[in-house]
Amino acid sequence: TTYVDYTPQTAPTYTQGRVWYDSTYEALSYYNAITGNPIHTGLEIQLKVYNNTGSTIAKGAAVYLSGGASGTTPYISLAIATSAAASNVIGLATAAITTGSAGYVTTIGLFDGINTSTFAAGDTLYLSASSAGALTNAAPSSPNYSVRVGFVAYVNASGRVYISKTNNYTAATSLVGVVPTANGGTNLSSF
């Protein structure tokens, strides 16, 4: 035969490498090496990472690549919007990652099981400038860095976020947009 049919079902018990058609998400899904971390094909992308920070990184914490690697697995640290390097969010920790171990970060797509009860559906979520790894629905102001991490898709203590990252800041020598001639510009777009 040239195809495989899967009977739609809810998530089965965990076994690394198990593949099924998830009737809840309507997507082909599988389990990786992390218990309880189903990957829903086409709905999310995950990156294997390594925590060498000395502390556990909580599920849902915003992280950035902090340099170095354990083999081919890059190191991560908690992101914060106070510097260009530390605000370069790659995604949210898919599950708690203990120090000295590998885990996964959801880099784009749906992220389930995050507390969104203090937000409203559709809120834009930004990287916090006051608490490392945290999200806020208010963009940090200068001199901090405004980094959109995603949007609230479902409000609940075990809610859902759609991760869609954008760094809204530019370097001091860069210009995005139009500067009117009255303000010393050319009134033309510059990229």
Image: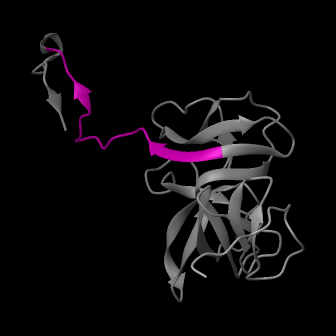
- As drawn, the residue found furthest toward the top would be 182
Part of the protein shown in magenta: 162-180
Asked where in the image residue 47 lies, by quadrant, the reply is bottom right
- As drawn, the residue found furthest toward the left would be 186
Q: Is residue 184 left or right of residue 49?
A: left
Q: Quadrant of the C terminus?
A: top left
Foreground residue, 181 or 59? 59
Q: For the point 76% across and 51% down, which residue is it?
A: 112
Q: Position of residue 105 (x, y in %)?
A: 63, 64
Q: For the point 62% across and 55% down, which residue is it?
A: 43
Q: Is residue 31 left or right of residue 130?
A: right
Q: Position of residue 57 (x, y in %)?
A: 73, 64
Q: For the point 71% across and 77% down, which residue is it?
A: 32
Question: Is 175 part of what is drawn in magenta?
Answer: yes
Q: Is residue 9 left or right of residue 144?
A: right
Q: Position of residue 132 (x, y in %)?
A: 65, 51
Q: For the point 62% across and 63% down, which residue is it?
A: 41
Foreground residue, 100 or 121? 121
